[in-house]
Amino acid sequence: MPPVDTIRKRIQEATPNEAKYSLMATYLFCARVSEIIGVTCPSDLGKTLARGPKGKDVITDTYTRDSGEEIEVAIWTIKTAKRHGKERLIALPLDKTYEPLTKPLLNYFQKFNKNEIVFPFTRQKATCYAKDIFKKLTYPIESYKIYKDGEIVKQPQDHNKLFRTHALRHLRATELLSKYRFDGSDLSVYGGWTLRSMLGVGGAMTRYTHLRWDHYFPKLLKKRTR
């Protein structure tokens, strides 16, 4: 996987702005691209719906640490793909000491009216932006098995894949686990995976955990240089 700082630098230097901020959101939110873009391509109908946010889908709040210190927070509401648009909350510190990308992304969102789609283009256009911005970057895919009717029908070997929009989700998930020490519960809330897939937890608990931003947020309060 390319270094996180390399990806962040390329995003920060990207043009035009809709490319920069759509990829920034995809990365920061650990999102699928359909959760960011706002237009469904006709060829995607019935398969992948665009669920991208509008101007109203971000607010600011404060988080109070045990010491009494108050931390400003930007909180985005994201509609989770593959879970019928179930909402989850992405909370990020506004203090640039902890996350220098939060404030620029918030500023970009605040330019839009509350019912205006922030990224009014298709996933194909987002892929084109990523192809240009992450040119020549790849990431490794480990061998995995594909089953049909209980039988292995294909087993691709280890290989490298071009770095595109979905790679940002893998990169961010890895960063949340390794740098910020997220556990399975934190990652399910943040990235929109089910608790069943992360922890084997099912039933009633999955109905309530998707909005617990204050549970994972303290782990994000680590200083970074870029």
Image (spheres, rainbow, N blue to C red):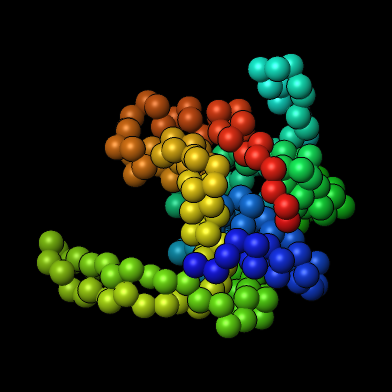
Q: Position of residue 118 (x, y in %)?
A: 75, 56
> Residue 78 vs residue 181: left or right?
right
**Residue at the spot x=49%, y=59% of the render?**
170
Q: Position of residue 217 (x, y in %)?
A: 61, 33
Asked whether residue 15 appears in the rendered view, the answer is yes
> Residue 25 vs residue 164: left or right?
right
Considering only vertical position in the picture, is 168 above or below 209?
below
Q: Position of residue 5 (x, y in %)?
A: 65, 62
**Residue at the spot x=55%, y=69% of the render?**
2
> Of residues 154 and 121, which is closer to you in this image?
154
**Residue at the spot x=87%, y=52% of the render?**
111
Q: Quadrant of residue 137?
A: bottom right
> Residue 174 vs residue 221: left or right?
left
Q: Position of residue 175 (x, y in %)?
A: 53, 52
Work out which residue is located at the far right of the displayed protein and give it.
111
**Residue at the spot x=32%, y=75% of the render?**
158
For the C terminus, the quadrant is: bottom right
> Residue 93 vs residue 137: left or right?
right
> Of residues 195 and 13, which is closer to you in this image?
13
Q: Quadrant of residue 58?
A: top right
Work out which residue is located at the far bottom of the displayed protein and give it.
136
Count of numbered circles on the image: 0
> Of residues 134 and 61, which is closer to you in this image?
134
Asked whether residue 42 appears in the rendered view, the answer is no
